[in-house]
Image (spheres, helix red, strand yellow):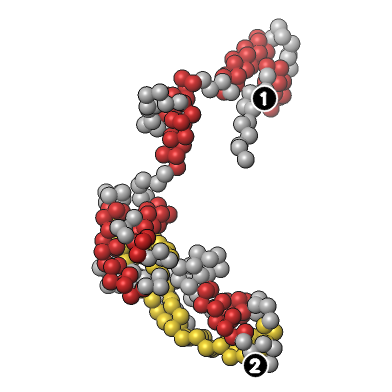
Amino acid sequence: MPLVIPDLDDIGFHDLVADAKALIPVYDPEWTNYNPSDPGITLVELLAWFSEMVLYRVDQVTEENQLRFLKLLGITLDKEEELASGMNRGAKQFSECTRAVTAADYELLAGQALMGFPGIQNKYPDLAYRTICLINTDMEDSTGETKTVFGHVSVILVVNTQNQRELMRELPDMKQAVKSYLDARKLVTTRVHVVEPEYLDVHLEMTVSAQDKGIASTVEKNVISFLDPVSGGGEGKGWPPGRRLYSSDLYHLVEAINGINHVTGITLDSPELLPHQMFRLKELKVEVEA
């Protein structure tokens, strides 16, 4: 649905004069003569007249003005190119991310670089990935637990495919390609590090009450999907780094499954995570009791 173009020229001379007169008691209570013969009212009407002309021009964007706006964006029309085509190019260019400044910029550009790695889409058609940018963090060379280093940016590549072993062999080259891509687009004083996730293991045993003994596979599938580092979490965007897993998360998840009466008990070994760490599900056992 196209956007409705607003009518910006929606106030006229008489409205402007009326608004100005209404403000006179606020700023000058001693001014009580509002007749046209009053010099102050003459000035109010003069300024309202000028304002009306300016407002009228707001809705009159000429082709010459549009060409000048495009020039400000560095867009010049090709020979015989229509103005609408140039405006579309300008709008597209304006919305493209070409420089890495914010964490979102780094994550977007890192994803572009990863998917642009030669042959990756053909070799790993099922590849799922996630990029995480940590500002003022050095996960490559820092030895401290917090890894906080001003001016450094660490980009974590979280990748998942059925051919994970082969992908891991190529990951060093992929990280170098992503780093080179980001280095060409970062701020001059920024130091970029492209790394793999730092995982800690989670062990989980769960007992649920249900009539159907076969529902254990459904519970396992939902838990594995929820804890997936790429697409898990409450929003389906992957588990947030540094966020610990709690039993309450699993109670809420499992008891929402159709056919589950309730969760009888959970034994969870989930370590405390530092802001740059993630977890992976190392062990999962689900028992069903009637």
Nearest to N terminus: mark 2 or mark 1: 1
Residue type, numbered disc 2? Glu
* Disc number placed over residue 39 in the picture, else none: none
Report the residue at 27% width, 58% height from top. Answer: 177
Residue 209: x %, y % from top left = 66, 88
Rendered location of residue 27, percent (x, y): 65, 25
Label 2: which residue? Answer: 289
Dot 2: element: strand
Classify residue 241 as left or right of residue 60: left
Residue 66 drawn at (x, y percent):
47, 25
Please name the residue that numbered disc 1 is placed on: 10
Quarter location, residue 122: bottom left
Local SS, label 1: loop
Q: Give the crowd class for mark 1: few <14, some 14-19, many >=20 residues within 10 Å.
A: few
* Mark 2 burial class by Cα count in 10 Å: few <14, some 14-19, many 20+: few
The answer to whether residue 243 of the structure is visible from this angle is: no
Q: Nearer the viewer, mark 2 or mark 1?
A: 2
* Nearer-the-camera pick, 139 or 27: 139
State which quarter of the image contains the C terminus: bottom right
Query: Is residue 70 visible to us here?
Result: yes
Residue at 46 percent of width and 31 percent of height: 85
Give the left or right position of residue 55, taking residue 211 as reference. Answer: left
Q: Residue 30's quadrant in the figure? A: top right
